[in-house]
Amino acid sequence: MKKKVILVILVLIGLHFLFKELGLLRVYNIPSSSSEPNLKEGSTIIGTSLKSPERLDFAYFKFSDSLRGWTIVKRLIAIPGDTLECKNGNYIVNNKKIDKHLNLRFAYKILPNVFDLYVKEQINYAEYYKYIDSDSVTAFLDNSFVEKLPIKLDRKYDDETRNLSIEIFNENPNWTLNNFGPIILPKEKYFFSGDSRDNSIDSRYRGFVDEENILGTVLMNF
């Protein structure tokens, strides 16, 4: 009996090493809203290193500048050899609008009376950032929400190029995070982005992700 108990303990230790230490199975909590509405802030993901991510998969990785060793979760947009463009915050890969079927989140600049009438009572402030300026309200809204409104809202574009990745944007200083390209991804380089396009510090700011720094692919979230 004692030998069986010891054997079970050894097996459990071995499984713990295989699944956790080797990254075969990982569990992470999502600490930010940068990939909302599809990965909710505070939700949990389960991923594995046994599956390499494909375009549009969520994956976890480390940027080359490490950011104090943090593991980052974003959506894979483009892989080595792909031709990548960005138009009005949407990505075009190899001449195809790759994210057209995704429910994305963007920033909108809204007149206060319009915000109060059509938006204020319809959103949960815990899930949407909003900033009140002297003449407008900036709210981060999902495509699925905006498309159902009886009026047209205007996107708020950040056309500043400061703090953007030199690795990507040095080809043309007039490119911005919402409009750039085309660029061809170098060998062993990957482009990741959050689904909350105006609220995500991703490859547009921090550059490509090295293949060796991709740790695994998200299998499920809840």
Image: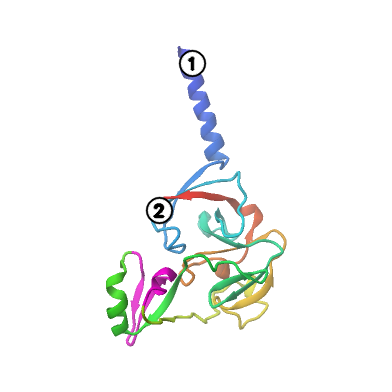
Which residues, given as a range, are shown in magenta?
Answer: 127-149
Question: Relative to the observer, which residue lies in front, 177 or 122?
Answer: 122
Disc number for residue 4:
1
Please identify the residue farthest to the top as the structure is shown. 1
Look at label 1 and name its amino acid.
Lys
- The residue at which mark 2 appears reads as 43
Find the distance from the CA under tag 2 to the CA under tag 1: 38 Å
Where is residue 56 drawn, in percent x and y?
A: 57, 60
N-term-proximal mark, 2 vs 1: 1
Give the secondary structure at mark 1.
helix
Closer to the camera: disc 2 or disc 1? 2
Task: Tell whether 105 sits left or right of 166.
Answer: left
Residue 36, quarter of the rendered image: bottom left
Residue drawn at x 32%, y 69% as measured from the top left: 123
Number of residues whose C-alpha sits closer than 10 Å to that of mark 2, classed few (under 14), some (14–19) or many (20 or more): few
Give the secondary structure at mark 2.
loop
Disc number for residue 41:
none
Task: Tell whether 6 sits left or right of 175.
Answer: left
Number of numbered discs visible in the structure rendering: 2
Where is residue 141 drawn, in percent x and y?
A: 40, 71
Residue drawn at x 60%, y 43% as measured from the top left: 50
Tell me whether circle 2 and circle 1 mark residues in contact (CB < 8 Å): no
Where is residue 118 drawn, in percent x and y?
A: 31, 78
Indicate whether residue 118 is drawn in magenta: no
* Residue 42 sits above or below residue 193 on the image: above
* Residue 22 sits above or below residue 213 on the image: above
Where is residue 101 drawn, in percent x and y?
A: 52, 66
Question: Relative to the observer, which residue lies in front, 21 or 222?
Answer: 222
Look at label 2 and name its amino acid.
Ser
Indicate whether residue 144 is drawn in magenta: yes
